[in-house]
Amino acid sequence: MINIGDHAFMNTAFSNSPIIRYVKSIGTSAFTNCSNLYTTEIGNCLCECIGEYAFAGCMSLNYAYFNSKAGYISSTNDVTLTVKSGAFAGCLSLEQIYFFNISKIEQTIFPGDTRLSSIYLINSMINSIARLESINAFEDQGLPSNYVIYVDSSLYNQYISDSIWGLISTHIQSY
């Protein structure tokens, strides 16, 4: 397992690399302004945190996939992912993003992401403490009016009947 440190690849020509497979955390501005980064997949790992502005300004990023536990055997079996403020700010090409086992989405992670239409929250129910902040991550961020948050069909009713998530129920669909 590795931690990708703060500013590790900031303003570089970094594109895609197999090192992204075994990541525990992604630091603040780790990939900020990496103009050659088109897709990112972090899987089969125990990724716990995507730092502030981690992928901000990655103008070519159109697809992101963060699986914080697929196929990985954890002794605690409770690894969850937190996404910090501004993590995907200004990713103007971003259309789809997948989060597995996400527990918290901070406010304003998608500002200016005008093409983001599909957000998948797989095996995820945002806990009650983080609900309001998570909702603010989607509202008033410049997202297209037709964005959809896809949730597990087994959790769909919990999301739409929740007093906070219900505020954006028109954007929630099951898969």
Image (tube, grey):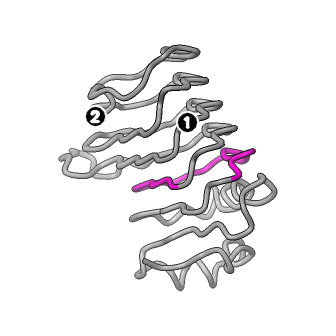
Q: Secondary structure at mark 1?
A: loop
Residue where numbered disc 2 is placed: 21
> Given the image, on which type of amino acid does mark 2 rest?
Arg
Q: Is residue 53 visible?
A: yes
Q: Residue 30 location, x and y as percent?
A: 53, 22
Residue 36 percent location from the top left of the image: 49, 26
> Marks 1 and 2: CB-CB under 8 Å?
no
Residue in view at x 59 percent, y 24 percent: 32
Range covered by the magenta-colored residues: 96-114
Q: Residue 43, position in %: x, y?
A: 30, 44
Quadrant location of the N terminus?
Answer: top left
Residue 101 in magenta stretch: yes
Dot 2: element: helix
> Up-down: is 143 above or below 40?
below
Quarter-of-image position of residue 167: bottom right
Disc 1 designates what residue?
Answer: 60
- Inter-mark Cα distance, 1 to 2: 20 Å
Marking on residue 127:
none
Q: Residues within 10 Å of mark 2 (few under 14, many from 20)?
A: some
- Lateral position of residue 96 relative to residue 129, left or right: left
Left/right placement of residue 42 relative to residue 26 reads left
